Image: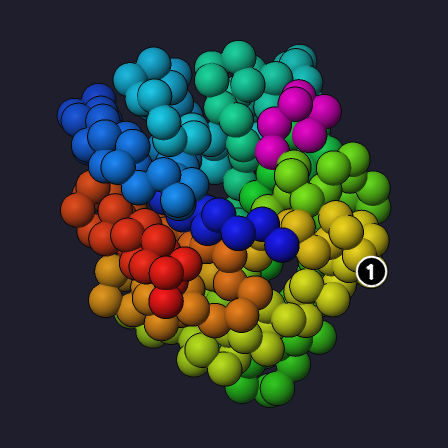
């Protein structure tokens, strides 16, 4: 099991060049907390600038097109993102699946193209509220992941991260209970072991996402099989984002 927690900030559609100072502040703080791996996924327009400004933290993208190049107006390929300095791509975020109608098949193609471009992948999954209320969350997430993950990934433990983000917890201030998070992450772990084998499946980090803040981070990050967090709103300032990273470091000592 990877023992260095990973805290990733997903800036979503936020950030102009004025936010570069925040990225620098995150980077400086991350250099003081090396037990925790810290990364941010700014909007496309800032990837290269952030990459040039920071020394310690990872920089990634929030999405990519499945192709490498061609007549796809407005799209950006994984190859282009890697060239801009991105080291990972988030794929299958619910805001893409729901807001842009992305299917599991498309998400899988995107993941493959990011891997082919030499980048790591953060594969998102998560159920909506009706599915959770119907008691079908675990079955839904397993099926979604099975259909979205490439069948074979070389060095999956290193290249792949899974982020469990229940849709009803994103940006709502609601979080899943530690018991529910633990049960879902255990389910995901079993699936990863089945797909990628005992050794690699155990190494894949599983992040929790959905209203993670400095105040609730320690409790969430202490749950078995929670190897980090994917953070939206609270990643937009160095103070709150690094509060979460520091809480992740504290769980290693606890
Ligand atoms: P919030 O942390 O704003 O709930 O967003 C979570 C998320 O969607 C990260 O990808």
For label 1, the residue is 194
Q: Quadrant of residue 64?
A: top right
- Picture layout, residue 234 above or below residue 48: below
Residue 40 coordinates in the image, percent (x, y): 38, 36
Name the residue rendered at 17%, 26% in the picture: 21
Q: Which residues are magenta?
A: 115-120
Q: Is residue 222 rendered to the left or right of residue 23? A: right
The local secondary structure at tag 1 comes to: helix
Name the residue rendered at 59%, 77% in the picture: 183
- Picture layout, residue 73 above or below residue 14: above
Q: Dividing the image into 4 quarters, which one contains the C terminus?
A: bottom left
Residue 16 coordinates in the image, percent (x, y): 23, 27
Name the residue rendered at 58%, 50% in the picture: 2
Q: Is residue 73 rendered to the left or right of residue 136? A: left
In the rendered structure, does residue 119 fall within the stretch colored magenta? yes
Residue 74 coordinates in the image, percent (x, y): 50, 22
Q: Quadrant of residue 225?
A: bottom right
Q: Residue furthest bottom?
A: 134
Asked if the beta carbon under badge 1 is closer than 8 A to the nearest atom of ligand 1, the reply is no
């Amino acid at each position: 099991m990877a023992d260095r927690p990973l805290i990733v900030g997903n800036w979503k559609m936020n950030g102009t060049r004025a936010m570069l100072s925040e990225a620098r502040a995150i980077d400086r703080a991350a250099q003081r907390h090396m037990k925790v791996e810290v990364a941010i996924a700014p909007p496309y327009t800032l990837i290269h600038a952030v990459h040039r400004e920071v020394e310690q933290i990872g920089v990634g993208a929030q999405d990519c097109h499945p192709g490498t190049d061609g007549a796809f107006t407005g799209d950006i390929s994984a190859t282009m993102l890697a060239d801009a300095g991105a080291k990972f791509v988030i794929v299958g975020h619910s805001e893409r699946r729901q807001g842009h109608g992305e299917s599991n098949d498309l998400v899988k193609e995107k993941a493959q193209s990011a891997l082919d471009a030499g980048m790591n992948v953060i594969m998102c999954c998560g159920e909506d509220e009706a599915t959770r209320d119907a008691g079908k969350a675990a079955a839904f997430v397993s099926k979604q992941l099975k259909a979205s993950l490439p069948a074979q990934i070389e060095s999956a433990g290193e290249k792949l991260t899974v982020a469990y983000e229940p849709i009803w917890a994103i940006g709502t201030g609601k979080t899943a209970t530690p018991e529910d998070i633990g049960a879902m992450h255990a389910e995901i772990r079993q699936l990863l072991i089945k797909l990628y084998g005992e050794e690699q499946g155990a190494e894949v980090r599983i992040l929790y996402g959905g209203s993670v803040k400095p105040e609730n981070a320690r409790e969430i990050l202490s749950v078995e099989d929670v190897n980090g967090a994917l953070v939206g709103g609270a990643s937009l300032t160095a103070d709150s984002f690094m509060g979460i990273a520091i809480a992740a470091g504290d769980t290693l000592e606890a």
